[in-house]
C-alpha cells in the first residue's frame, strides 16, 4: 500500500516514475480527461514499501481504527482505499489513512 504525500508525488515526477499518456510527467502538468497516468515503481521500492507497511501495522496493533478504512484494491504497486468522512489522508499521528498504512 502506498500513501502519497504531495512531496512524494513531486519526487516521483522528477525521477521520471510518473507517465501521462506515455510521456514523462512534470510537476507543473495538468491532467486532462481521457489521459492515462502510470506510476513506474522500481521493484526495490515496492518491497521496501511493503516491508514498511507490515512493520507499521504490527506496531499499531489497533484493529479498531483500521476497520474504518476499507482496502478496495491492493497489489505490489498501488492501493485503493475508502476512508470515512472527516478522516485525514495525511498529517501527523495515526488517526490518518497514512498513519494506518
Image (tube, rainbow, N blue to C red):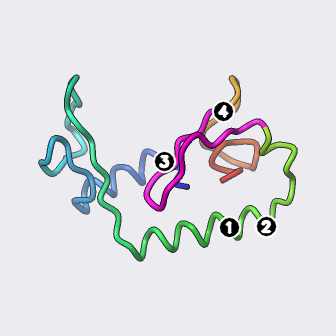
* Residue 1 among those drawn in magenta: no
For residue 5, the mark is: 3
For residue 58, the mark is: 2
Dot 3 or dot 2: first in sequence order is 3
Q: Tell me whether circle 1 and circle 4 mark residues in contact (CB < 8 Å).
A: no
Callout 4 secondary element: loop
* Residue 74 among those drawn in magenta: yes
On screen, residue 86 versus residue 3, left or right, reads: right
Q: How far apart are marks 2 and 1 (CA)?
A: 6 Å
What residue would you read off at disc 1?
Answer: 54
Q: Distance between the residues labelled 1 and 3?
A: 19 Å
Nearest-to-viewer mark from 3 and 2:
2
Callout 3 secondary element: loop
Q: Position of residue 87 (x, y in %)?
A: 70, 31
On screen, residue 52 versus residue 94, left or right, reads: left
Q: Tell me whether circle 2 and circle 1 mark residues in contact (CB < 8 Å).
A: yes
Q: Where is residue 91 in the image (x, y as percent from the top left)?
A: 63, 44
**Magenta residues, start to end:** 68-83
What residue would you read off at disc 4?
Answer: 83
Against 17, is 9 above or below? above
Nearest-to-viewer mark from 1 and 3:
1
Taking the view exactly as shown, the residue that stands out farthest to the left is 23
Callout 2 secondary element: helix
Dot 1 or dot 4: first in sequence order is 1
Q: Distance between the residues labelled 4 and 2?
A: 20 Å
Amino acid at each position: 500500500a502506498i500513501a502519497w504525500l504531495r512531496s512524494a508525488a513531486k519526487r516521483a515526477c522528477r525521477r521520471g516514475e510518473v507517465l501521462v499518456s506515455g510521456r514523462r510527467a512534470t510537476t507543473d502538468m495538468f491532467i486532462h480527461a481521457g489521459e492515462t497516468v502510470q506510476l513506474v515503481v522500481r521493484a526495490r521500492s515496492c518491497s521496501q514499501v511493503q516491508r514498511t507497511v507490515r512493520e507499521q501495522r504490527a506496531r499499531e496493533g489497533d484493529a479498531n481504527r483500521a476497520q474504518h478504512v476499507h482496502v478496495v484494491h491492493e497489489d505490489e504497486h498501488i492501493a485503493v482505499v475508502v476512508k470515512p468522512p472527516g478522516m485525514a489522508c495525511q498529517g501527523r499521528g495515526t488517526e490518518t489513512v497514512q498513519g494506518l498504512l
